[in-house]
Amino acid sequence: MDLITLHNLQMVMLSGMFLLGVITCLAGVAILVSGAWGRDLRAITDQTARLAQKGITEEIAGLVGNASTLLTALNEMIRTSTGIGVFLTLAGATIMAVSCWFLFQLG
């Protein structure tokens, strides 16, 4: 009576692979839903926009330049966060699909 047969080992490995896919997919969805740090990032963006407006009305070129640089950096950070979320979601879905395919091949 062997508890660890080849079939049992394969099933445990496929279960772990599927679980890893679920965790990866959920992490990607969580990143997409959170929206790159949510409230804090929006507050920084709003303050930067106000600084830029103040700089334009008071003709302070350096302030406007720095504010626009900050807005550009924030937009890049949001895009990067979204890209990571999409990648993790797709990678998790792929890992789950591959583990299911292997499971059906073992059948």
Image (cartoon, grey):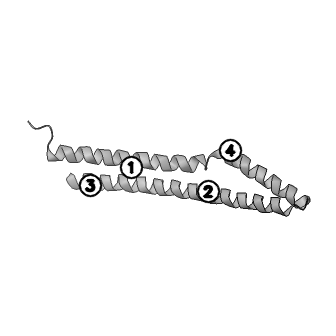
Q: Distance between the Cα atoms at labels 4 and 2?
A: 13 Å
The answer to whether the residue labelled 1 contacts the one labelled 3, judged by CB atoms less than 8 Å apart, is no
Report helix, strand or loop for mark 4.
Answer: helix
Q: Give 63 or 13, whichever is nearer the viewer.
A: 63
Q: Which residue is mark 2?
A: 77
- Residue 58 versus residue 2 in the image, above or below: below
Q: Which residue is mark 4?
A: 40
Tag 1: amino acid: Gly
Give whichever of discs 3 and 4 has the lower sequence position. Answer: 4
Residue at the spot 45% in from the left edge and 49% down from the top edge = 25
Residue at the spot 36% in from the left edge and 54% down from the top edge = 95
Give whichever of discs 1 and 3 has the lower sequence position. Answer: 1
Q: Distance between the Cα atoms at labels 2 and 3?
A: 37 Å
Q: Quadrant of the N terminus?
A: top left
The answer to whether the residue labelled 4 contacts the one labelled 2, judged by CB atoms less than 8 Å apart, is no
The answer to whether the residue labelled 4 contacts the one labelled 1, judged by CB atoms less than 8 Å apart, is no
Report helix, strand or loop for mark 3.
Answer: helix
Q: Give 100 or 87, whichever is nearer the viewer.
A: 87
Q: Which residue is mark 1?
A: 21
Front tag of 4 and 1: 4
Q: Position of residue 39 (x, y in %)?
A: 68, 44
Report helix, strand or loop for mark 1.
Answer: helix
Query: Label 1: few (<14), some or many (≥20) within 10 Å?
Result: many
Give whichever of discs 4 and 2 has the lower sequence position. Answer: 4
Q: Which residue is mark 3?
A: 102
Q: Distance between the Cα atoms at labels 1 and 2?
A: 25 Å
Q: Position of residue 16 (x, y in %)?
A: 31, 45
Q: Is residue 13 left or right of residue 69?
A: left
Q: Residue furthest right?
A: 58
